[in-house]
Image (tube, rainbow, N blue to C red):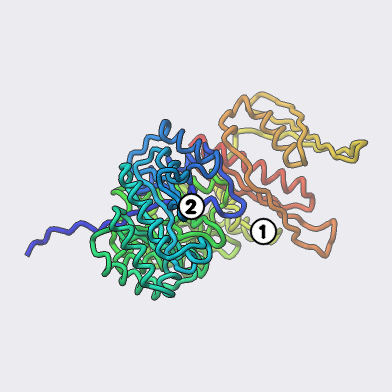
Amino acid sequence: MSTTPQPATMVEVFDTTLRDGLQVEGVSATVDDKLRIAEQLDRLGVHFIEGGWPGANPKDVEFFARAAKELQLGTSTMVAFGSTRRPRGKVDDDATLRNLLDAQTSAVCIVAKSWDYHVTEALQTTLEEGVAMIADSVEFLNANGRMVMVDLEHFFDGYKRNPEFSLRTIEASVMKGATHLVLCDTNGGSLPHEVSAIVADVKRAVGDDAVIGIHCHDDTGCAVANSMAAVLAGGRHVQGTLNGLGERTGNCNLTTVIPNLQVKLGYQCLPEGRLERLTSVSHHVAEILNRPLNPQAPYVGSSAFAHKAGLHVSAIKRAKDAYEHVDPELVGNGTRFVVSEMAGRATIQLKAEELGLPMDGPAVNQVIDDLKRLEHEGYHFEAADASLELLMRYASGWVQEYFNVESMRVITDELPNGDFSTEATVKVWVGENRHVHTAEGNGPVNAIDTALRAALAEAYPQLDRVHLTDYKVRILDGATATGAVTRVLIDFTDGSRNWTTIGVSANIIEASWRALEEGLVYGLLHAAG
């Protein structure tokens, strides 16, 4: 008997972040944004990138034109999305099909009605014409040299109601040369046992004549589970989006389904060596779209492998896999130890090791004492990892030598027209040089930030890459009204790293200043390192 290991079964990954994903509320992407995301998806190694619907809007027309010239895809295939010909129309003069050809992609994906209810009610045509629309469109695109994938819209709803018609749409697609039949749970209402049974039926009917794919929405919270059920039933093509973006509750989250299939079930979804890029690509796309990633996202979230409970931390110190279902490094993430006033010596020591800080017994004790005192005052270091790191560095003897603030002043004036003007002045020492800068802003924090950056710009041009992304204020003791203690959290990014700092004071300006100053110090620390 041969002991040669067999190659893993391939499951194609089709990313639709640039089309379906951008239908999520509150997200908009420029053409430059879409090109940058496509580069990240190719870096990850997905098989197909659906770039958009050419002809639907000027942005997608420009995207495909620029993608053909500017993108150098090494792994992925660009796909243009569209629909079948119109009811009672002709393929030769159908604008949608012509736009698909004009996009100049080697592969196209067309959406087709596979639910009889949609054909008769939405399209207002006969079932025979519904099948002919699919057949004619696939044949036309295939004859023009395109790989043709068919997204069978509402397939599961249609199959439950009229399986005979749904299978006719599949037969028409295959007979005219479609390479992929993508079964879509468009309403997101199906459950895994239903998906499994229906995909198995389709697989028996199609055999190896075409690749069976799955496209799930997450309205029941089952998009990932449904996609896995489809693969286990014979599907070999999974469609989804980075970070689960998509309209309503989103699409199947590729950052979850890919490692589930590849790490847990042994399928080959990405090229060798690409899975460890998953976390960085996930965060990069979130940053481009200004859509903060859920910290508790499986595999790629900042809390996915974070540990706070003392029992967990102690166990991990002895056996790292005790509370981690996979090695975080497989997906490019890492173990993180969350520290609070309840932390013991083991937690602090593990956190120090994580940060690469040499800390002896007295330093560890100092950190524990500082944590208890500061969290009693209102600090919350679980939410401000950067401030925690600086606290630990100071306890270990580190001294911040980037700059020293002599003073800071903020003035707010009410103008004659009722508007308010804010001006900040900072006096800063950088080495032996004293800098005094004044700046205006649309509020105290913005004014202070602008003035401080101006003071530091010549010495530290790398701060140009550091940006504030969020500013959060919480009143800790509302009973004392305007004298209440205020907690300020500020989120920063330099494009590749994200961090949060904290400030606490009865004076909101002081709390903001402390968080801002620490955020810039942390940015300089890691830019230098």
Q: Which quarter of the picture shows residue 435?
A: top right
Picture coordinates of residue 141, whole percent (x, y): 35, 46
Picture coordinates of residue 229, whole percent (x, y): 36, 69
Type of amino acid under label 2: Ala
Crowding near pointer 1: few (<14 within 10 Å), some, many (20+)? Answer: few
Crowding near pointer 2: few (<14 within 10 Å), some, many (20+)? Answer: some
- Name the residue beneath numbered marker 1: 373
Q: Which quarter of the picture shows residue 249?
A: bottom right
Compare residues 194 and 513 and report the one nearer the observer. Answer: 194
Q: Which numbered dot is residue 465?
A: none
Picture coordinates of residue 13, whole percent (x, y): 36, 53
Q: Is residue 353 visible?
A: no
Q: Earlier in the sequence, mark 1 or mark 2?
A: 2
Which residue does the image show at 31% across and 54% down from the upper left? 178
- Name the residue beneath numbered marker 2: 352
Position of 107 compared to 448: left or right? left
Residue sitting farthest toward the left: 1
Position of 485 compared to 184: left or right? right
Picture coordinates of residue 235, whole percent (x, y): 32, 63
Compare residues 364 and 235 and report the one nearer the observer. Answer: 235
Type of amino acid under label 1: Arg
The answer to whether mark 1 and mark 2 are in CB contact below 8 A is no
Q: Secondary structure at mark 1?
A: helix
Compare residues 526 and 65 and report the one nearer the observer. Answer: 65
| Above or below, 84 relative to 62 | below
Q: Point out the image quarter for the N terminus.
A: bottom left
Q: Is residue 340 visible?
A: yes
Which residue does the image show at 62% across and 47% down from the upper left? 491
